[in-house]
């Protein structure tokens, strides 16, 4: 039965509280595109993507108009291209990245993910060549996103891969220095990467996925912030219950859109990602939810506890609204993409170390953080290793998306525009870990990974 109160409440969420569908992402398998000829590979990849997703944007726009629900991004994720590239050289991978970018432009989508590799247990020859190509590929394309999984609870932490990624991040920053090193905003390093994540820059089409699939990511930070404000001075049990009920309503909107997109496109429904994905817009901030709970400013004592409760309540409410929950599903804390996080960092309340502590209880990790451009490679590698260890030890997904802003120092700022926002350049410890990183090898998997 249609409930008029629920309809009006949803309309208010959209108009006043920034409720939207952050992304409808189509996953596409490229396994059948494998070829030992580079030109033929690129041709097959372009044809497969443009044919499979030719109606993605128009269908999402039709759903948006019919239901009045904003759909902010239309995206595509593909099989990690290191797995389908045969004997591609680094230059061949750059050419393949241009092919992905051209396909994205043809489709009119916002981003395409999958220019990446899975190297948690070792780096194969194809993966190594792709990693070498990442800086040039991201510098020369606009819509291509890259991710590299360097650790997992089952495999441990590949420190050789982390050492490599430190240099890749620095090189990517240098090649895009005229644009505030924006190339690094399209590159993320993972532990325990999920195969059905609809969010960039980490989205790719997993090997266990169908030929094509629709995954949807929801955003409702502003809705939750408003609910917390209306709750007033209640205790935490009551507040958690309010957040759960709110997350349920948000997820039902995502489930509706996901089901409609799946039906109209004739593509299997994958998952609904519950994540609270903030934006730079006023009133659409995870940091403001935390402050609404009573923490003076995000980053102050109590922040991690508030975030842990928020993350848990969102998941508990969301799983009741959809039988297909997946992806990352939690509260994101990307500094440049969250108005409240930006303000807290500018006030000095939010440090890199505090953000790392927060990542132990939320999704996903150290995300969209600008650091001084002269930060040494070994320090970047150490930051990545620390974050990967949180994911491996706690059997959760963690990630690092750092932007070493060339020519910038702590206290300066970088601007990316759109959903990527802007960020203050945050202070990094002056102490390094070069000897630690130079040991190389693998940090072994924890004992609790042995579950068979």
Image (spheres, rainbow, N blue to C red):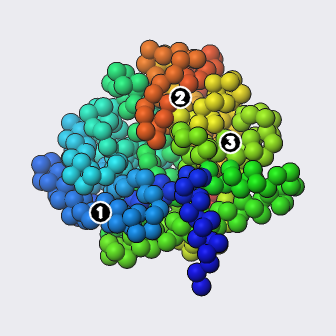
- Does the image show residue 85? no
Q: Earlier in the sequence, mark 1 or mark 2?
A: 1
Give whichever of 420, 405 is nearer the camera: 420
Please tell me which residue is depicted at 71% across the width and 27% down the height of the picture.
349
Q: Quadrant of residue 320?
A: bottom right
Numbered disc 1: secondary structure: helix
Residue 288's label in the rendered image is 3
Quadrant occupied by the N terminus? bottom right
Q: Residues within 10 Å of mark 3 (few under 14, many from 20)?
A: many
Tag in front: 1 or 2: 1
- Does the image show residue 144? yes
Numbered disc 3: secondary structure: helix
Tag in front: 3 or 2: 3
Height in image: 172 above or below 224?
above
Height in image: 188 above or below 50?
above
Q: Earlier in the sequence, mark 1 or mark 3?
A: 1
Quadrant occupied by the C terminus? bottom right
Please tell me which residue is depicted at 62% across the width and 71% down the height of the picture.
6
What percent of the width, then of the height, locates residue 165? Answer: 44, 33
Give whichever of 415, 148 is nearer the camera: 415
What percent of the width, then of the height, locates residue 151? Answer: 53, 46
CA gap, disc 1 and disc 2: 33 Å
Which residue, given by chain and number where applicable, does mark 1 sit on?
Answer: 58
Height in image: 139 above or below 433?
below
CA gap, disc 1 and disc 3: 34 Å
Q: Earlier in the sequence, mark 3 or mark 2?
A: 3
Which residue, given by chain and number where applicable, does mark 2 sit on?
Answer: 423
What percent of the width, then of the height, locates residue 338? Answer: 57, 39
What percent of the width, then of the height, locates residue 124? Answer: 35, 46
Please tell me which residue is depicted at 68% across the width and 24% down the height of the picture.
347
């Amino acid at each position: 039965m249609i409930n008029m109160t629920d309809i009006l409440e949803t309309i208010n969420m959209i108009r006043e509280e920034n409720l939207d569908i952050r992304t409808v992402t189509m996953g596409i398998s490229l396994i059948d595109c494998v070829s030992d000829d580079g030109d033929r590979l690129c041709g097959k990849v372009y044809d497969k993507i443009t044919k499979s997703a030719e109606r993605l944007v128009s269908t999402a726009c039709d759903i948006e108009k019919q239901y009045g629900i904003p759909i902010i991004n239309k995206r595509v994720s593909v099989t990690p291209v290191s797995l389908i590239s045969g004997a591609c050289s680094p230059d061949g991978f750059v050419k393949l990245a241009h092919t992905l970018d051209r396909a994205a432009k043809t489709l009119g989508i916002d981003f395409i993910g999958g220019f990446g590799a899975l190297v948690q247990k070792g780096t194969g020859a194809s993966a190594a060549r792709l990693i070498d190509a990442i800086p040039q590929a991201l510098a020369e394309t606009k819509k291509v996103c890259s991710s590299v999984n360097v650790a997992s609870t089952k495999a441990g932490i590949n420190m050789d891969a982390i050492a490599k990624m430190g240099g890749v991040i620095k090189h990517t920053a240098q090649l895009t220095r005229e644009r505030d090193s924006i190339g690094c905003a399209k590159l993320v390093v993972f532990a325990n990467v999920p195969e059905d994540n609809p969010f960039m820059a980490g989205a790719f089409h997993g090997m266990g996925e169908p030929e094509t699939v629709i995954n949807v990511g929801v955003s409702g930070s502003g809705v939750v912030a408003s609910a917390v404000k209306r709750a007033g001075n209640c205790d935490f049990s009551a507040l958690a219950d309010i957040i759960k009920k709110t997350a349920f309503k948000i997820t039902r909107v995502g489930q509706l859109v996901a089901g409609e997109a799946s039906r109209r496109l004739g593509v299997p429904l994958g998952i609904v990602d519950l994540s609270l994905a903030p934006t730079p817009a006023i009133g659409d901030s995870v940091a403001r939810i935390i402050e609404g709970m009573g923490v003076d400013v995000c980053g102050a004592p109590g922040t991690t506890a508030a975030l842990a409760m928020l993350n848990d309540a969102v998941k508990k409410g969301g799983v009741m609204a959809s039988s297909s929950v997946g992806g990352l599903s939690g509260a994101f804390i990307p500094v440049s993409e969250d108005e409240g996080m930006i303000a807290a960092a500018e006030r000095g309340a939010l440090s890199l170390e505090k953000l790392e502590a927060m990542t132990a209880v939320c999704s996903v990790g150290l995300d969209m953080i600008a650091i001084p451009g002269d930060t040494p490679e070994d320090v970047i590698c150490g930051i990545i290793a620390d974050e990967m260890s949180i994911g491996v030890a706690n059997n959760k997904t963690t990630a690092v998306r750092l932007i070493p802003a060339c020519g910038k120092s702590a206290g300066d700022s970088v601007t990316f525009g759109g959903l990527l926002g802007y960020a203050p350049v945050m202070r990094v410890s002056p102490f390094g870990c070069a000897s630690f990183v130079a040991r190389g090898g693998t940090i072994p998997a924890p004992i609790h990974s042995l579950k068979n």
